[in-house]
Image: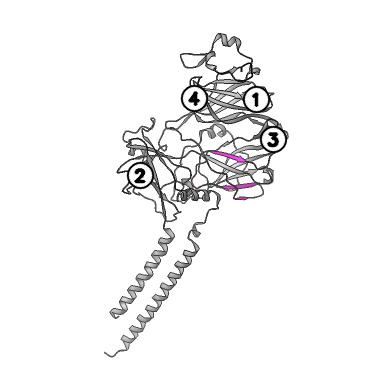
Amino acid sequence: MSGAAMWTLRAGSAFVAVMVATSFSAVHAQPATSAPIVLQGDGPYHRLTLPLSIYGSAAHGDLRDLRVRNAAGHAVPYAWLRNEAAAPRTASQDVPIFALPGSDTGTASADASLAFSVRPDGSLALDSKAASAQRKASEATQWLIDLSQVKGSLLQARFEIAPDARGLFAFRLEASDDLRQWRPVGSEDQLVRLAHSGQTIERLAVDLGSLRTRFLRLRWSDPQHGVPLTGVGIDSVQEVEPVAPLEWSGPLKPGRCAAAYCDYLLPRGLPVQSLRIDLADINTLAQVGVSGLSEPAPATATPPQPVPRNPLYALRHQQRRPVSLPDRPDESPLVDAVVYRLAQAGGEVRSPVLALDGAVYTRLRLRTAGPVSVLGATPPTIAVGAVPRTLVFLAQGGAPFSLSWSAAPDTGTVEGAVPGAPLALSTLIPGYASDKPVVADGASVTLPTAAITAAVAAAVQPPIPQTDGLDPSRKWWLWGALGVGLLLLAGMAWSLFASLRKDGAAPD
């Protein structure tokens, strides 16, 4: 074989190899996204709570390729905050309540502290003079709830009313630590007990959103249409690490509806803890079963649970078995409930927020006891609430620091030790104890607009199959380049064989 022929063959092979490598790199390339981190305090450790919108734009639902980088672009050590913390402890207890009158004008009294004294254990005692003047429960325009003996964060309040009480009772809650300065807790809420179509609709539990306070005050929105309280129970949770506030997604429309259910696509990796079902049509009532659907995980992938399961869900549903039966093995029944939107004389009443288990699902399915049309002419939208994940990182190297992650799905990632991967808290922080909170300063991050747009799109668009992950125009370009490379290689092979025949026919 001549030197020119060998060079031609090697050059053609190299060209085809480059084209094939380019094709695969285009298929598997992952554009990176980053966002600046703003530090608070001197560190060296900083606590960073991630915005929920990161799930929709990240390549992996478990955020395995998330990195914290310093000014030089080097990954710094970090750990997920709550993975090793002691398990939360829930408790339920009845608390003292006091019926308080309003003024002669019908408004609530200005200073409830004047009627009480504080015992050595911190609980309240009604003064003798105030006790003799205390109104009957049926005449109370406000109620004081003593939470001084409740430990931890408040999950929910369970109100008890007279068995024969019926109606819609609107109220507002206020919180205080000294009975003098009061702050609002949420917006106007309702206690509900109604009879409708042979069913009794009852809503007597109110979420408190991990509130911490010593006292609550309930004020009826219309003092003439209150209801006597016969008792109040409080469910609380004690956790080592503080819990970030619940965040809500935007409204999610169903991806598809069948005869007896609707499916809703969720942002990737989002640990859903609360569900709000917004019925489109007024005077609608239906029984639904809520299930979570999960995509089959690869055999090699064992994604960790992002956050502990919702303690409020455990309190409400651990003893209940949903009556709706799944028709696929990857469907997990979560809760059965009656959802409603009714017009009443005192205003419109809607079904409460549902507590879910805090696990990660690809879709949520709403099953109906009858045809899906019982939910109204237009299928309802939903919103899901979740507690964002929090990490702790060591501010190693120079500022500014940034958060980076892959922004496109990756089907070819090989698991293994990766520089900058999250550590155990006990490795990141020498002397770490799971029964004590981590001492760290704050930090914050704001995602770029492009990442937020991608997150919204991921929440409302059907998932793109992995086999179609390449843009069509790029796909045709790659196939064309490979075809040209093969034709060139064939031409060079024909030239090589012609040269070999010529050399063989030459005289010795």
Q: Which mark is residue 343?
A: 3
Q: Secondary structure at mark 1?
A: loop
| Dots 1, 4 in contact, CB < 8 A | no
Q: Which residue is mark 2?
A: 401
Q: Is residue 181 magenta?
A: no
Measure the C-alpha gap from mark 2 to mark 1: 53 Å
Quadrant in which the C terminus is drawn:
bottom left
Residue underneath mark 4: 213
Assign a secondary structure to mark 3: strand
Instruction: Count residues near mark 1 (Cα–Cα under 10 Å), then give few for <14, some for 14-19, many for 20+.
Output: some
Q: CA distance from mark 1 to mark 3?
A: 17 Å
Q: Amino acid at mark 1?
A: Asp
For mark 1, what is the residue? 222
* Residue 274 is a magenta residue: yes
Q: Earlier in the sequence, mark 3 or mark 4?
A: 4
**What stretch of residues is rendered in magenta?**
255-280
Q: Is 90 located above or below residue 383 in the figure? A: above
